[in-house]
Amino acid sequence: MTLTGNMLIGQHTVTGSREAIRAIDPATNLVLEPAYPGGTTEQVDQACALAWSAFDSYRETSLEARAHFLESIASEIEALGDELIDRAVAESGLPRARIQGERGRTCGQLRTFARTVRAGEWLDVRVDNTQPQRQPLPRADLRQRQVPLGPVAVFGASNFPLAFSVAGGDTASALAAGCPVIVKAHSAHPGTSELVGQALARAVKACDLPPGVFSLLYGSGREVGIALVCDPRIKAVGFTGSRSGGIALCQAAAARAEPIPVYAEMSSINPVFLFPCALQARAEALAQGFVASLNQGAGQFCTNPGLVIARQGADLDRFIATAAQQILRSPAQTMLTPGIFSAYRNGIEALAGNPKADTAAAGLAAEGPNQCQTHLFVTQARDFLTDPSLQAEVFGSASLVVTCADDEQVRQVAEHLEGQLTATLHLDDGDLDNARALLPTLERKAGRLLVNGWPTGVEVCDAMVHGGPFPATSDARSTSVGTAAILRFLRPVCYQDFPDNLLPTALQHGNPLHLRRLLDGQREA
Amino acid sequence: MTLTGNMLIGQHTVTGSREAIRAIDPATNLVLEPAYPGGTTEQVDQACALAWSAFDSYRETSLEARAHFLESIASEIEALGDELIDRAVAESGLPRARIQGERGRTCGQLRTFARTVRAGEWLDVRVDNTQPQRQPLPRADLRQRQVPLGPVAVFGASNFPLAFSVAGGDTASALAAGCPVIVKAHSAHPGTSELVGQALARAVKACDLPPGVFSLLYGSGREVGIALVCDPRIKAVGFTGSRSGGIALCQAAAARAEPIPVYAEMSSINPVFLFPCALQARAEALAQGFVASLNQGAGQFCTNPGLVIARQGADLDRFIATAAQQILRSPAQTMLTPGIFSAYRNGIEALAGNPKADTAAAGLAAEGPNQCQTHLFVTQARDFLTDPSLQAEVFGSASLVVTCADDEQVRQVAEHLEGQLTATLHLDDGDLDNARALLPTLERKAGRLLVNGWPTGVEVCDAMVHGGPFPATSDARSTSVGTAAILRFLRPVCYQDFPDNLLPTALQHGNPLHLRRLLDGQREA
C-alpha cells in the first residue's frame, strides 16, 4: 500500500487543508514522505457527525459481533506485514525488535478486549425483582446495565506508535465499550497512523459496521484536538502525553456546556525504594537491574524509574558506584523526535546546573542526531523536600537518587511525592516491617506497587493498573492498560418495570447472555 | 438532648465564629433556636487535618468492623426517637409521616451498605498469577483491589433532611468505601443535622474508630464549602442541590492544583412520554397518577415529573382536562424554605408570563406562608424546541405538557432534552414499536427509564441508578442512590510480585475473605 497523506472520515479518505505535518526519521533527521495536511474544523465536525450517527447502532452490536470486530482489527494490522514495521521504525527511531514486540502487544490487547467483551462482566448486570406484596409499598422490578458514554476522542502517544496510538489501548477499550472513536494521530508517526487507520477502517467495513465507528485526523497544532474535545458529540477523551497537554485538554473539557471525562495519562517519575537489607545484600545487582530498566527504550516509558530513594551509607554508595559504572558504558540511544530530544537535553541541563544535584554519571556520548545520553544524579532528601524542580519529570534515561538520613526521611520523601503510575520496593525479609510502614503512603500515591522488580514493562491483563493520582493521570479512578480500562467508557442505566420484550438482551428475564448477574443481592453462580 | 448550635470536629464540639444560620419553620416563618454560628477556614482546616489523620487507619478496618459501624450509625439515629422527628418536621415543613418514612429509609440505607461492605464485591479483586515459564518474558504475579479515594466532603441537601443529608446516601457510601467524611450541613435544617451528627459521632466512638472519620460543619455562605472543596486533603465531593451550586463546586474542584471528582446531583425535569395507545386507553387514570406524583412532597423531589410529552389530539386533551381538574382541587403545600418558595414563585411567574406557555390549571391558593400552589402549563413542541427557558427546572409542583404534531416531533423533543435523572414511558402493547424507537435517545439522556410508573420514589437497591448525564449530575458514570454508589469513592491499585505477608488481606493467596475473584480471567464460583 502506498501512503497517501490522507485522513479518514469513516470509509472516506479526505485531504486536510491546514499546515501539514511530516514525519522525521530521528536517527537521520531526514524528512519522510508524504506530507499530512492538517484537518479543518469542518472536517472535525464531519467526523463527529459520522461518529454520532454510528453510536446508537454500534453500541447495540452483539457481544460476539463486537468481539469479532476487535479481532478483525488485530488481523488487519498483522496483515500489514513489514510495511508497518519499516515505517514505525523509521518514524520512531525505535529498534525493529521493539516495534515487532509492540505490534504483538497491540494485537494481543485487541484480542484480550475481545475476550472481555464476550465474557460480558463489564455490563455489571444487577437485577432486583419486583416485590408486589412488600409493605408499605411494593417494590418495582429494577434492572441495571452499563451503556457506553458516546463517541470518544483518542490522542495518540509519541512513545508507543502502535500500543498507545491509533489502535492502541484507548481505542481498543473505547471500541470494546461500544463507543465510536475518532483518533487524532500523533504528529511523530503519521505514516504508521495511516497504515493502522486503514487497517482499522477495513475491519469496520469487513464487519459491516456503520462507517462512523472510526475516523482518523491529523493536525499540526492544537486546533484539531481542541475542536474535537469541545464538540458536543464527543463524550469522553483518552490521552497519553505531556502534563501541559493533558491539563489543557482537561480544562477545555471542563469548560464545555456539558463537561466530559478526560482520561489523561501525563507525568510520573516512578519512585524506587531500596530498603536496607536488600541494599546490603545486593547493591550491585540492584544497580545493574536499575540501569537496564533506565536504559530501556531510551527511557521513553511512562514507567521509567526516574527516582531512587534510600538511606545513605556504604550500601547506597555501592549501588551508586555500580550504577555509574554501568551508565558510563551505556550507549546513547536515538529518541523518538527532535522535540523530545531537545526537552531531554533541557531537563538534563537544568539538573546539571542545579547546585543541589550532583551528576553521578553520564553515558557514552551521542554518535548521531537526537541521541539520549543516560544520566544519573544524586541529591539529598532535605533538598528534594524543598526544591520542587527536583521532582519534575525528565522524559528519557535520566534518574535521580535521593539520599535520606534515616527511615523517617524516607517516609517524608514518599509523602512529599506527587501522584505516580508506579512505586517500587526492593526488600528482603528483614525489610518487611519497614516496607509495611511505607505502604499506606505508597497506596495513596501510586496506581501500581511492585516488589523486587522494575516498573518498565506493563502487562496487559485483568489486574493491571496503569494509572494513579494526579498528575500521573487526570482521573485515578481507572486504568489505561488492562481489561479494566473498558470501565472508563461506561455509565449505568436502570430499567424499571420494563416488559421483557422492551428490555435490552442483557437484562431480559431469561438471561439469554448467561451473565452472572447480581440477582436480588446474590451473585449468580 | 439539648441542641447546642455547635459543630463537630471529630469528637470535639466547637463553636463557629462566623455569621450564624438559624432554621426557620416554613409553616410559620418562625425562627427556631438555637443559632448555628458558621465555621471559620481554620476550623475547616482542623476538620480536614483530623480526617486525613484518620484515613489510613479507617480505610483498613475489616469489612465486618466497617459494616458494624454503619449499622451502629443506624441504631444511634433510631435512638434519637421523636426528638429527631419533631425537629425535622419543624425545620422542613414536611409531614410527620414523610419524615418518619425518610428516617426508615436512611437507616435502611446504612444497613444496606453494611451488607454491601460485608459482601466485598466492591473490592473488585482481580488476580493474574505469575507465569514464570512464559515466553518471551515471564509474567509477574499481579493483584488488583479497590482502595478509597480519601476524605470526602458531603453537602447536605435541602429536600431530604435525613436521607440526603448528614448520614444520607453520600455519607453512607463514602464511609462504606473507607473514606472519612466531613459534612457541611444544609442551612435549612441545622438542628436535624446536629442531632444526626451527634448520633454519628457516638457511633464513631462506640466502634473505637479514629475521631476524624466524621466531622460536621456549618456555614451561612460559600466560605466553608469552597474551603472544604479546595483543601488538598479532600479527595472527592458529594453534593445534591442547585445547578448553579453544583457547577460552582465543580469549577472549584477543577481549579485545584490536584483536581478531584465532584458528584453533584443538580437539575432534572424528568420527562414523561405518553404513547398513543396508553393515552387512548386510560388518559384519565394517567392524569390522576401524574398529579399524585406531581404533588408528592410539594414537588420537591429531584425526580418530580416536570415535563409531559405526547402527540396532540383528543386523548391528550382528556389527559390535560383530568389533570387540570385534579390540580384545581390540590391543596397548597408548605415548601422547605422561604428561599425555595420564592424561587418556585419566580419560576411560575416566568412560565405564566411566557406567551409560549398556557396555564392549564393552578391548585388551591395558599393558606399559610411558603405554600406551593400546584401548576400545570401547556406548550407546543415547536416552541419548546426553540425556547430554552421552557426546559428550566422549576423546583416544586409544576409541570409542563409539550404537545407534539407527530411521532417525529416527539423524537425531536426527546433529542432536544438536556440530561435527566429519569425518563418515563406510559405505553400499551400497541405502543411497543414506538417506544422501542425512542429508547436509544432516552438511554443517552437519562440514568433511569421507567415503564408505566412515576419517577418519584427511588428504591435503595443494587440496580438503582439515581444519576444521569449533565446537568442531571456532573458525572454520569455513577449513581448517588443504591449500593453501586460505593464505587464512586474508589480507585484501583495493583500489587505486583508482593510476598503474601505484605499483601492486603483481600489479595492474599489463600483468599481469606472468600471473595469471588477474577482469577486468571475466570470468575471464581
Image (cartoon, coloured by chain):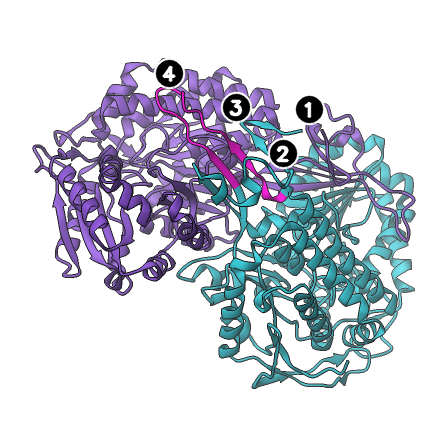
Chain colours: A purple, B cyan
**Decide: marks 2, 1 in contact (CB < 8 A)?**
yes
Tell me how far mark 4 sits from mark 1, CA to CA: 31 Å
Specify the segment rendered in magenta.
Answer: B122-144
User: In the rendering, at what x and y percent does residue B382 appear?
Assistant: 67, 48
User: In the rendering, at what x and y percent does residue A500 appear?
Assistant: 79, 30
Amino acid found under the numbered disc labelled 1: Leu
- Identify whether A409 is placed above or below B509: below
**Decide: marks 4, 3 in contact (CB < 8 A)?**
no
Q: Quadrant of the N terminus of chain A?
A: top left
Residue pointed to by mark 3 = A114
Residue A360 shown left or right of residue A456 in the figure = left
Label 4, residues with CA under 10 Å away: few <14, some 14-19, many ≥20: some
Are both tags, 3 and 2, on one chain? yes
Residue A56 shown left or right of residue A143 in the figure = left
Mark 4 or mark 3, earlier in chain: 4
Tell me how far mark 4 sits from mark 2, CA to CA: 30 Å
User: In the rendering, at what x and y percent does residue B363 appear?
Assistant: 86, 66
Residue pointed to by mark 1 = A513
Amino acid found under the numbered disc labelled 4: Glu
Mark 2 or mark 1, earlier in chain: 2
Residue pointed to by mark 4 = A78
Q: Secondary structure at mark 2?
A: helix
Residue pointed to by mark 2 = A123
Query: Is residue A437 visible to us here?
Result: yes
